[in-house]
Image: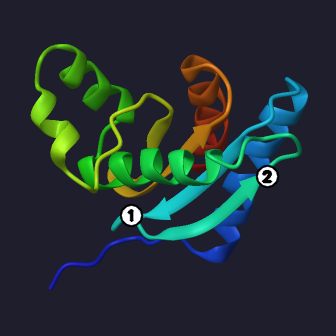
Amino acid sequence: MQSKAILGHEETTRIMAAARAEALKNNWPVGIAIVDDGGHLLAFERLDKAAASTVYIATGKARTSALGQKESKVYEEMVNGGRVAFLSTDIMLCLEGAVPLVYQGQVIGAIGVSGVKSFEDVQVANAGAAVLG
């Protein structure tokens, strides 16, 4: 039998707080989604003035990162490189802006951000992910 770490409420809250602080520090109106390793939503925040679409986009980016166990940027680059078949799946959102959450070498979830430029979304996501070390 194998065992694995899982994201609890305490960790999810700390990750969200760090991501929110980074977004607020830069005055970025974003949506922030945290999902478990199966891509299921654990937490979401839509900061003031963030577009309604950030709810769907941030969550989709996070799900893609968790299920693929890679930054969502990898899938965007694949599509841009000609692997357009990724666009046909209903579980992948091939846009930069999400990073996996890794604990002791194991992907335990992901954080996705939407609302500003992609590299800024990643900056917010990385701030949250850094909580895990």
Q: Can residue 102 be seen in this view?
A: no
Q: Is residue 97 visible?
A: yes
Give the class, few, some or many, for how many residues have Cα within 10 Å of label 1's Cα (few <14, many ≥20). Answer: many
From the viewer's perspective, tell me whether residue 118 is left or right of residue 40.
right
Q: How far apart are marks 2 and 1 (CA)?
A: 20 Å
In the current view of this chain or complex, which residue is farthest to the top? 81
Image position of 119 with respect to 6: above or below: above
Residue 103 spot, x, y in % from top left: 44, 54
Residue to which mark 1 is pinned: 39
From the viewer's perspective, tell me whether residue 88 is left or right of residue 68.
left
Q: What is the number of callouts on the image? A: 2
Answer with mark 2 or mark 1, whichever residue precedes in sequence: 2
Image position of 94 with respect to 69: above or below: above
Q: Nearer the viewer, residue 87 or 46?
A: 87
Kindly identify the amino acid type of the residue bearing the numbered disc 2: Ala
Q: Which of 87 and 128 is in front in this view?
A: 87
Image position of 42 with respect to 103: above or below: below
Q: Residue at x 61, y 37 (%)?
A: 114
Kindly identify the amino acid type of the residue bearing the numbered disc 1: Gly
Q: Label for residue 17?
A: 2
Residue 77 spot, x, y in % from top left: 27, 19
Q: Residue at x 56, y 28 (%)?
A: 122
Residue 11 spot, x, y in % from top left: 64, 65
